[in-house]
Image: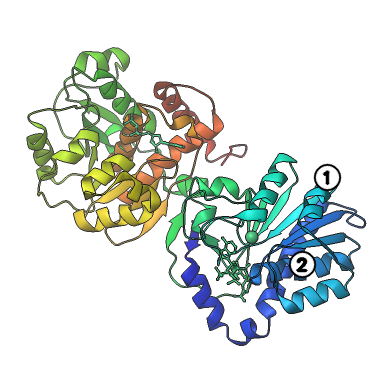
């Protein structure tokens, strides 16, 4: 599990270091780590290689300049373009004294022809409103010429706390200080950051804004069957999904539960023939279950509220998906209930615009969990799991091949299998969402959800072996 910090939290921790900040020691630590990453990228013989610094007005530019000083001492040829009238004074003086050369905006563009790499020190966590003017033109030129970019703290133009892909550099490597920021883990902004190297500069950070899961967490929490497991111990999922209009959702949600590893699935919805034809192992007789899954592909259904109320009345862990989300009524939910909306559904649940959810997905997921008392899995390019306590955790991310009709149905089934195996709702959601993403990473390409979910079954045993794209 990794943690993500807000800009305010990073600033607070920087200030709390007192002397370290005032004396410039923090900046020296940042610059030293940055220079090491640049040297690693330059390879065995850094002498004579060419690095171009883009230096803005703030401390981010200061980091770049002090890293430039270290590179000059190693024989690297370093030029710097000042994107603002005033830059970090001491850093600039040291850079010039060490033999660094200034280039103007036009020469910086020309220098891209033979630069080995660019260090982006235009804006850091103080940047607002996206990259503009000559710096934006330069960032585009770096992309066009495929010049490798190492971003200082974050690709200039992104805002640390935001997932929004504002106009920015697109970095190959981002060297970030203290801890990860939201823009480095949340899509679409994260796609601009490349490989993220977190450097410990000695900040004492408090409670993170967000936690992130990795494949190691999936392996640690997956309900591996033991030598004494039987089908009941592994968990029975009761499914009521699909309808005459959407029989496919019945099949897909059931497949999610089966390929996620449920011991048994009881399908009790309106598309029994379709489900049994696709999955003869599924039982259609009523009986005891350990978790319920309702809603996927219901469409409008007169008894929706009654079914949801009945399931919730049972007190069993329940996944409430799709149409069932709008049949919750005033029922008091609880941490054993998992709601699985996408951004549009969450907006409707909270009576806000979809664009508001997209601008602050974690905040809206957190609000929904706190208002309903249930765990909320917000689906999308980044998948957030919010718990009533306020904790928000990001599932392992995967490619957008998963973004297709029916993936949500299989995901709901995967989560239900984890619930039936006894995992708490937050973990069940993180397991389901992460497993689907890991499958899409390892078996990329356009394949329908009924195929992708079979690859979920393929990647589960691989979680314990090397060679998996995590
Ligand atoms: N605290 C520390 O000592 C340590 C900090 N560290 C480093 O410092 C970085 C944070 O430094 P920082 O606070 O100086 O902010 P930074 O992002 O460099 O510049 C902000 C300036 O840019 C300007 N500006 C804003 N938006 C703009 C835009 N769109 N287009 C153009 N200009 C824009 C804005 O001007 P304003 O909007 O206020 O007029 C302001 O002048 C941090 O990311 C890390 O790299 C490390 O050294 C460790 C120790
Ligand atoms: N850009 C993306 N990258 C990766 N996964 C995505 C992306 N967009 C959506 N997804 C995932 O695809 C699935 C789509 O779910 P949903 O919209 O509910 O589809 P449906 O209800 O049609 O099955 C979810 O698991 C979601 O997290
Ligand atoms: K930067």
Q: Is residue 247 above or below residue 325?
A: above
- How crowded pointer 1 is (Cα within 10 Å; few <14, some 14-19, many 20+) is rated as few
- On the image, numbered disc 2 is attached to which residue? 67
> Given this view, does label 1 or label 2 mark the residue nearer the observer?
1
Quadrant in the picture for residue 26: bottom right
Q: Quadrant of ligand 2?
A: top left
Q: Is residue 302 above or below residue 276?
A: below
Q: Which mark identifies residue 340? A: none
For image coordinates 38% across by 33% down, the residue present is 260
- On the image, numbered disc 1 is attached to which residue? 113
Helix, strand or loop under label 1 = loop
Quadrant in the picture for residue 381: top left
Image location of residue 278, percent across then percent down: 31, 15
For image coordinates 51% across by 55% down, the residue present is 183
Q: How many numbered discs sit on the rendered protein?
A: 2
For image coordinates 15% across by 28% down, the residue present is 300
Image location of residue 126, percent across then percent down: 55, 67
**Left or right, residue 196 beside residue 77:** left
Quadrant in the picture for residue 383: top left
The residue lying furthest to the bottom in this view is 19
> In terms of depth relative to the viewer, which is nearer, 191 or 321?
191
> In terms of depth relative to the viewer, which is nearer, 184 or 59?
59
Image location of residue 107, percent across then percent down: 82, 54
Helix, strand or loop under label 2 = helix
Any part of residue 223 in sight: no
């Amino acid at each position: 599990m990794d943690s993500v910090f807000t800009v305010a939290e990073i600033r607070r921790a920087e200030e709390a270091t007192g002397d370290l900040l005032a004396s410039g020691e923090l900046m020296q630590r940042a610059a030293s780590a940055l220079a090491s990453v640049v040297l690693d990228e330059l390879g065995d013989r850094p002498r004579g290689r060419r690095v171009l610094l883009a230096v803005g007005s703030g401390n981010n530019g200061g980091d770049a300049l002090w890293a430039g000083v270290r590179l000059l001492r190693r024989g690297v040829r370093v030029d710097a373009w000042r994107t603002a009238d005033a830059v970090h004074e001491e850093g600039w003086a040291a850079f010039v004294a060490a033999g660094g050369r200034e280039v103007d905006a036009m020469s910086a563009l020309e220098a891209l022809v033979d630069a080995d790499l660019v260090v982006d020190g235009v804006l850091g966590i103080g940047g607002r409103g996206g990259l503009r003017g000559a710096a934006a033109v330069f960032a585009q030129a770096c992309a066009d010429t495929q010049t490798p970019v190492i971003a200082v703290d974050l690709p200039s133009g992104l805002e640390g706390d935001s997932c929004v892909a504002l106009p920015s550099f697109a970095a190959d490597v981002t060297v970030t200080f203290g801890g990860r920021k939201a823009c480095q883990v949340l899509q679409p902004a994260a796609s601009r950051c490349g490989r993220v190297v977190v450097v410990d500069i000695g900040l004492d950070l408090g409670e993170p804004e967000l936690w992130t899961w990795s494949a190691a967490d999936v392996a640690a929490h997956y309900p591996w069957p033991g030598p004494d497991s039987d089908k009941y111990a592994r968990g029975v999922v009761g499914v009521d999904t699909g309808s005459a209009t959407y029989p496919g959702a019945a099949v897909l949600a059931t497949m999610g539960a089966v390929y996620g590893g449920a011991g048994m699935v009881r399908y009790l919805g309106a598309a029994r023939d379709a489900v049994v034809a696709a999955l003869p192992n599924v039982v259609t007789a009523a009986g005891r279950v350990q978790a319920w899954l309702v809603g996927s592909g219901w469409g409008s259904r007169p008894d929706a509220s009654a079914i949801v109320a009945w399931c919730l009345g049972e007190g069993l862990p329940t996944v409430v998906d799709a149409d069932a989300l709008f049949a919750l009524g005033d029922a008091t939910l609880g941490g054993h209930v998992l709601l699985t909306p996408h951004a549009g559904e969450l907006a409707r649940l909270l009576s806000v615009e979809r664009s508001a959810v997209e601008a602050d997905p974690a905040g809206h997921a957190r609000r929904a969990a706190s208002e309903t008392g249930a765990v909320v899995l917000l689906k999308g390019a980044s998948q957030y799991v919010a718990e009533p306590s306020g904790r928000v955790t990001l599932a392992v991310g995967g490619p957008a091949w998963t973004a297709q009709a029916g993936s949500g149905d299989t995901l709901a089934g995967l989560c239900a299998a984890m619930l039936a195996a006894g995992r708490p709702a937050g973990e069940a959601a993180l397991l389901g969402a992460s497993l689907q993403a890991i499958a899409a990473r390892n078996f990329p390409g356009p394949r329908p959800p009924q195929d992708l979910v079979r690859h979920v079954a393929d990647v589960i045993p691989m979680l314990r072996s090397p060679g998996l794209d995590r």
